[in-house]
Image (tube, grey):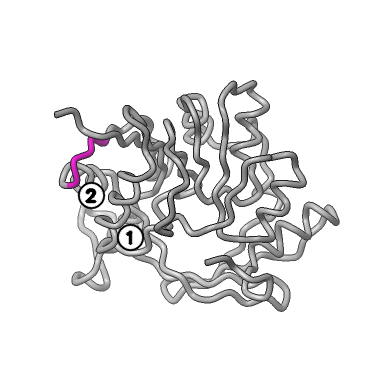
Amino acid sequence: MKLSSGKDPMGSAIADYYYHQKANKLRVQSSLFEEDEIPVPYLFRTFQEMPLVERQALRLCRGEVLDVGAASGCHSLALCGMGYPHKVTCLELSQLSCDVMKARGLNHVLCMDFFAEEEIGRYDTVLMLMNGTSIIGKLERMPLFFRRLDALLAPGGQVLVDSSDLIYLYDNGDGTYDIDNPNSYYGEVDYRMVYKNVRGERFDCLYLDFDTLRKSASAHGYSCELILQGKHYDYLARIAKAKE
């Protein structure tokens, strides 16, 4: 499945900014939070402009890389700018974003859903940044996520993924937490993006705390290592097939 231009707010914003050097507000709506905005130039950030978690992930890449949810291609282009000697493949659902990545000089671009049951090769590094766990959507989809990794990782391969622990949103300041719905995982968020007159469909987004990610990885035969803790409940983790 690919996103059509009429249902692709982020791709429309990326295309506007790339081809016209300007863009309107990319609005983010949720039933849980007040409306927010993604600064479109941030989607074109350079290596020096990236947060520490992302810079460290890029330094840890090895072998052939699959850049998942590549958007404008900033992480792949940063690898190229670092003189990365191996092949980098971008995977993105948005056709508009894929067209921009190709225009920016990225030659290996796949326009498809990460969860599509399609053989696209095996990779030494699967790179999932800018809250990479978001594409999982719901905690109940973790088995599906690890089955997909089984198909994508080369022997000895790794996944470099970042996320955030949203527990801080429910902190009462006294060591207790007031979670609205104790029957669902607090990191499950619904979003919709709007750009100009382009209104996207609602989608589920998963923010995972590290301990939940580690336990799920272990249950599916993977190891999970905390690489770096960010300044605001964010982190970088490395997932790999557990050694038998």
Q: How crowded is mark 2: few (under 14 residues within 10 Å), some or many (20 or more)?
A: few
Q: In this view, does 234 lie to the left or right of 156?
A: right
Between 225 and 145, the one nearer to me in the picture = 145
Reading the chain from its start, which is encountered first: label 2 or label 1?
1
Between 243 and 33, the one nearer to me in the picture = 243
Question: What is the span of residues highlighted in magenta in the rendered image?
Answer: 220-224
Between 161 and 97, the one nearer to me in the picture = 97
| CB contact under 8 Å: marks 2 and 1 | yes
Q: Is the magenta stretch mostly helix, strand or loop?
A: strand
Quarter of the picture holding the C terminus: top left
The span from disc 2 to disc 1 (Cα, nearest Å) is 10 Å
Residue 46 place in picture, x, y as percent: 67, 36
Quadrant of the image occupied by residue 156 = top left
In this rendering, is residue 239 above or below 215?
above
Residue 28 place in picture, x, y as percent: 56, 68
Residue in view at x 65 percent, y 60 percent: 95
Residue 32 place in picture, x, y as percent: 41, 72
Q: Name the residue under label 1.
A: 187
Q: Is residue 197 left or right of residue 54?
A: right
Q: Mark 2 points at which residue?
A: 212
Residue in view at x 15 percent, y 46 percent: 219
Residue in view at x 68 percent, y 40 percent: 107
Residue type, mark 2 in image: Thr
Residue 167 colored magenta? no
Residue in view at x 75 percent, y 42 percent: 104
**Of helix, strand and loop, which one carries label 1?**
loop
Total number of numbered discs in the rendering? 2
